[in-house]
Amino acid sequence: MTDGQGLRLTTPGDREIVMARDFAAPRERLFDAYTKPELLRRWFGPHGYALVECDIDLRVGGHWRYLVRGLDGSEMTLQGVYQEIVRPELLVTTQTFDEGDYIADNASLVSTSFVEHDGGTTLTTTVRYPTPEMRDEMARSGMAEGFGQGLERLDELVASLA
């Protein structure tokens, strides 16, 4: 499936969601936008949301935590631990949500790869959920739409950094 902004979504297994999008930017710029709090604050989250807290300990075993706030004051906290970091190619982290509607005890494994080609980069995020039910719940939640909107904002940011 492809959305109107170039996000390609697949579900290769009963526990995975894979989202990919192409950017007209070098992978180093995208990697920085994923790992530097001052850049993350400028793009992370769907339209109408702001990343109001962003803590990153960018090392294997290091913890990260984001607090996202909507225009209506609603908040969502995401957090995890870095499992693998290969600059500027790959980030692998656990991820949990601290919000009433999500299952907070079960960490998902999130792998984000940055593959450069022909002056651009394909960013691919694979989320492996602990259970098929959790994957299905996240698919119904609008997560892909929100992620796609965040990537639109990321595209604007990396273009402005050129």
Image (cartoon, rainbow, N blue to C red):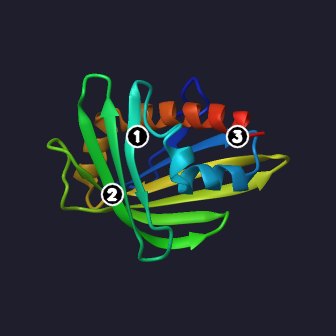
Q: Local crowd at mark 3 within 10 Å, few (<14), some, or many (≥20)?
A: many
Q: Is residue 22 above or below residue 123?
A: above
* Distance in Å between CA atoms under marks 1 and 3: 22 Å
Quadrant of residue 146 in the image?
top left
Q: In the rendered structure, which disc, 3 or 2, sits on the residue that comes first in sequence? A: 3
* Count of marks overlaid on the render: 3
Give the number of the disc on residue 79. 2
**Type of amino acid under label 2:** Gln
Q: Are marks 3 and 2 in contact (CB under 8 Å)?
A: no
Q: In the rendered structure, which disc, 1 or 3, sits on the residue that comes first in sequence? A: 3
Instruction: Identify the residue position indicated by label 1 in the image.
Output: 51
- The residue shown at (84%, 46%) is 119
Which mark is nearer the camera, 3 or 2? 2
Q: In the rendered structure, which disc, 2 or 1, sits on the residue that comes first in sequence? A: 1
Q: Position of residue 17 (x, y in %)?
A: 43, 49
- The residue shown at (55%, 54%) is 36
- The residue shown at (64%, 31%) is 156
**Type of amino acid under label 1:** Leu
Q: Is residue 91 left or right of residue 81?
A: right
Q: Local crowd at mark 2 within 10 Å, few (<14), some, or many (≥20)?
A: many
Which mark is nearer the camera, 1 or 3? 1
Q: Position of residue 83 (x, y in %)?
A: 45, 73
Residue placed furthest toward the right:
118
* Distance in Å between CA atoms under marks 3 and 2: 26 Å
